[in-house]
Amino acid sequence: MEFEITSDTRNELLGRRELRFILTYDGATPSRKEIRGKLCALNNINENLVVLDSLRTGYGRMQLDGFMRIYDTEEGRQRTERSYLLNRGEPKKEEEEA
């Protein structure tokens, strides 16, 4: 996987950085968890502060365009982001039958 960051802007009002990137990959499309982990490792940031908003692939292309937000605090992330985006890409919790 190779990342190319096309845009990196700072949103002071919401306390976050907004990144647009292009990911080039071989084989199957990587999962959201793999992409988030790799981007966090490259930028040396905590995964709890990151939200992957959109990932768009094209037919026959081995690359995708993505949009990611990096918050200053986890509280700001919880306050600002929609709940389905916070849960997207996380493993589903199994319901316990009692």
Image: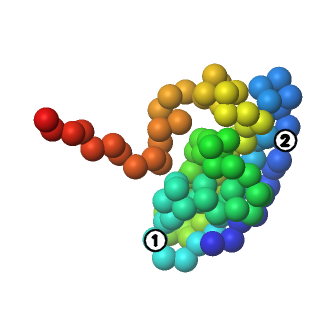
Q: Amino acid at mark 1?
A: Ala
The residue indicated by pointer 2 is: 9
The image quadrant that residue 38 belongs to is: bottom right
Residue under label 1: 28
Q: Quadrant of the C terminus?
A: top left
Report the front residue among 8 and 79.
Answer: 79
Residue drawn at (74%, 63%), measured in percent from left and top?
Answer: 42
User: Which numbered disc covers residue 14?
Assistant: none
Please state, as top left, top right, bottom left or bottom right, where the N terminus lies in the image: bottom right
Image quadrant assignment for residue 10: top right
Relative to 63, say whether 13 is above or below: above
Q: Quadrant of residue 92?
A: top left
In the picture, measured across the screen, residue 75 lies left or right of residue 92, that is right
Secondary structure of the residue carrying numbered label 2: strand
Would residue 22 be seen by someone viewing this image from the given angle? no
Task: Identify which residue is drawn at 47% across, 42% down.
Answer: 88
The numbered mark, 1 or 2, whose residue comes first in the sequence reads 2
Q: In the rendered view, would you say 26 is above or below 59?
A: below
Look at the picture and state if 10 lies above or below 45.
above
Q: Residue furthest left?
A: 98
Q: Residues within 10 Å of mark 1 (few under 14, many from 20)?
A: few
